[in-house]
Image (cartoon, helix red, strand yellow):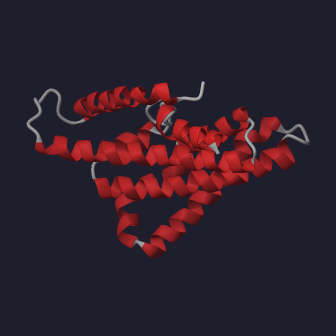
Amino acid sequence: MKDVILLMVSATLVNNVVLARFLGLCSFMGVTTKVDTAVGMGMATTFVITVSAMGDWALETFLLAPFDLAYLRTVTFILVIAAAVQFTEMVIRKVSPALFRTLGIYLPLITTNCAVLGVALLLVEGRYGFIDSTLFAFASSLGYSLVMVVFAGLRERLALAEVPMLMAGPPIGFITASLLALAFMGFSGMSAN
């Protein structure tokens, strides 16, 4: 049980996919102007990462590794991710048309979000079992969502602040992101290693 908790805390906070591994930065900077949008994107990405990690684990374990087809790993993982994104897109369009319109182009771009593929490849590298893979993927996506929502909240506050004209827009966003990354580095003493 202790190992599971350490794995999840490590994936969520210590080795955060956005702030420690620098994956998923396009959506991190593009969708985080409003907290509502960031929450929606975080939920959609959490679902896609978790579901695709389960499918990718099964493909790796039962097809790619036994038949020595590792060279097809990236292509097959992207196909699984694309299928999960299509399913997510159909559900969001049906359940919340307003969120679907708000997310716009960023929803289909989850397919090319390097955080989603990065988590799948980290699972292969870590050689986790099915349960650990699923928990790691879920925790990584929770970390992604947490950072998205926190950063969106900070950006909403910055929109109301008097920022020097030279620093307005993306520059202050990048400075805020770097300070957020420094804050998350404080969790590095919590790792199991």
Question: Does 83 appear above or below 135?
Answer: below
| Residue at the limit of the structure toward the left, as seen here | 162
Q: Which residue is drawn at 48% across and 48% down?
A: 142
Image quadrant of residue 29?
top left
Q: Which residue is drawn at 51% across and 50% down?
A: 110
Instruction: Please tell me how many numbered marks the rendered image carries.
Output: 0
Q: Where is residue 19 in the image (x, y as percent from the top left)?
A: 43, 32
Image quadrant of residue 72?
top right
Q: Is residue 36 visible?
A: yes
Q: Quadrant of the N terminus?
A: top right
| Residue at the limit of the structure toward the bottom, as seen here | 94
Q: Position of residue 174 (x, y in %)?
A: 30, 30
| Residue at the limit of the structure toward the front, as seen here | 2
Q: Is residue 79 visible?
A: no
Q: Residue at x 59, y 65 (%)?
A: 87
Question: Does 185 appear above or below 148?
Answer: above
Q: Where is residue 6 in the image (x, y as percent from the top left)?
A: 58, 38
Q: Tell me if 68 is positioned left or right of 17 in this view.
A: right
Q: In which quarter of the image is the C terminus?
A: top right
